[in-house]
Image: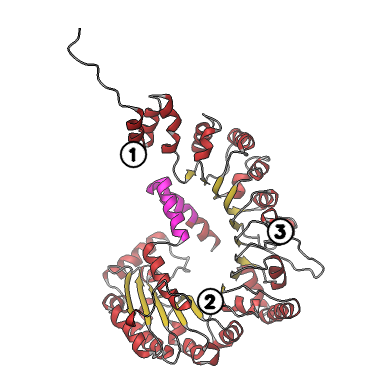
Amino acid sequence: MSDHAAPKLLNNDILLNIMQVSDTNTVCSLMQVSRPLYHLGPTCILPPLVFIEDEQRLQSFIAFMTAEEPYRFKFLRRLCIATDSISSPVSELLVDFLTRFKSVMELSLLHIEYAERFIQSHPGLSGALAGLSHITRLFLRDAGKDAGAYCYAMNASLDSASLTLTPLPVGTTEETVWGEQARNPITLLHHAQDTLRSLHVDGTVLDSPEDVMYKPRYSHLTRLCLRNNDLPWVFHYVRAFPNIEELTFQVSKRVWDDITQTPDLVERQSRINAASQTEFGTWTKLRRVTGTLPDLLMLALLCPVEQLVVVGPWFHSTMANPVLESLKPAYLELQDFDVPFIDSGRFADVMAGPEASSIRSLSLDLNIGVEVEPGEIDFARTLDTLVEAISGLLIKTIGLNIGCSCLLFPARYDTSLNNQALVDWYKKHRASPPKVTRYLQDLDLDALAQRFVDAVPSLHTAVVTLTSLPGRRHAVAVANEDNSFTWNTPGVEAIPLKRLRDALRGADSDDQEVRDFAEAMGMDRFLKFAQRRLDTMNTRV
């Protein structure tokens, strides 16, 4: 009889706890210990966001998900496919996989990064994807004709969708490249008209024949964003999206080229949209609108809105005053402006007019150096001009964000510089920074915030942030007399504080998506993926 007792085995509960804090290889090894652990392993292996960037990972994913079919699908919630076109054998495998398990795949997010080339990998892939009926959020990037056909055929009960369509080739029309409905934001996701609440489409084309009445009506949609768009046709938007609360609109470069050739195009489109709203009505629930001043002029909205976001660089009283007079915003936010719009007096001219009397809260996002060379900027003078410009307003809160990313590198629209030129430029300015950089490094943000409060009799709260400045990133100051406003205060007066809170918490949804991608991929893979996206964007610019 042995004097030594048999060693005690670790029970499954202990091993499961070990699995939950182990890497994938360890989890796979522990799954082979017992049937219960094999069954519970997928809860530890599948991340919150499954990221697939090549054929090998796609094949591994399919093999893993089908090992205990259909058990493991209940752990799959968010899926991102960032591979380019795939080979015929793998695409056939994927089509079969999607067809077999379409009823058990319930995704809160489906993101396809290179949608057109990926879907073109197999003639049946568009139909197989369209068979997935349980998708809450859809993201498609670089979507072309075949990806558009997928959207038009899909039958998922979407809550939100974000689609970036491929640029229309120069010298062609949407009919010759796409077909009748593929770029139409009203018909593209018509099967989701009863459930869709948020829609973002980049690159749409909506012709407006007088005898066309589009049938889809998205009665639950509250957020509509149309970027790189054709001319705005408010009649069709109001009819198709009657209950929107937030609208973002931006025309494409192709339209800007047309405007350059036909200067009265803005005024003509404005008259058309104003007349249609007068005759057929306009939105009744719209509270926030975002666009450049030419975009807003062409929309010619006749409904007052609570919040107006004007995107730079255009700012002049001949454009701003009609927009402010029509919309009567209580909150005005100016995004992506450089110092010339203040130094030139254009901002002061608009703020001094009666059209600005409705404004109770103001936010300014300055992007210093995006238009002018840093060496030409006298920011002390800019602040003096700004303080004088707002002194006559009846605002209660103000937010100023001083963005300095363009002080680190040459103006972002200069595409003539190669990587070595950028490095040389950066080294030079790092060793001998321009005057504006030195000024901002020493700027007392608390004193500036208090200066705003002292200059404007009605002002109670001022928020100042300084971002992307070497050695002083994300500096913050708040002057809040008697704690008059907090971010929980109802009304537009709290918006500058809410924006500060969200920036400090990193609460922006795009930032959250970025963090999820980085976590799922690992930093090295994430940086490579980000570089591919930047290369695509730079090619378009």
Q: Residues within 10 Å of mark 1 (few under 14, many from 20)?
A: few
Q: Which mark is residue 43?
A: none
Q: CA distance from mark 3 to mark 2?
A: 29 Å
Q: Amino acid at mark 2?
A: Gln
* Residue in view at x 57 percent, y 87 percent: 321
Q: Earlier in the sequence, mark 3 or mark 2?
A: 3
From the top left corner, tell me how far across and down residue 49 is, in percent.
Answer: 47, 46
Name the N-terminal-most of marks 2 and 1. Answer: 1
Considering the numbered disc 2 on the image, is that residue within a helix, a strand or a loop?
strand
Asked which quadrant contains residue 454, the reply is bottom left
Local packing at callout 3 (Cα closer than 10 Å; few below 14, some 14-19, many 20+) is many
Amino acid at dot 1: Val
> Is residue 286 something one can see in this rendering?
yes
Disc 3 marks a residue whose amino acid type is Thr
Residue at position x 65%, y 60% from top?
A: 168
Question: Which residue is under mark 2?
Answer: 307
Res. 187 mark: 3
Q: CA distance from mark 3 to mark 1?
A: 47 Å
Q: How is the image coloured?
A: secondary structure
Viewer-side residue, 206 vs 244:
244
On screen, residue 356 above or below 216: below
Residue that label 1 marks? 21
Q: Residues within 10 Å of mark 2 (few under 14, many from 20)?
A: many
Left or right of 73 on screen, residue 190: right
Residue under the image location 63 percent in, 43 percent down: 132
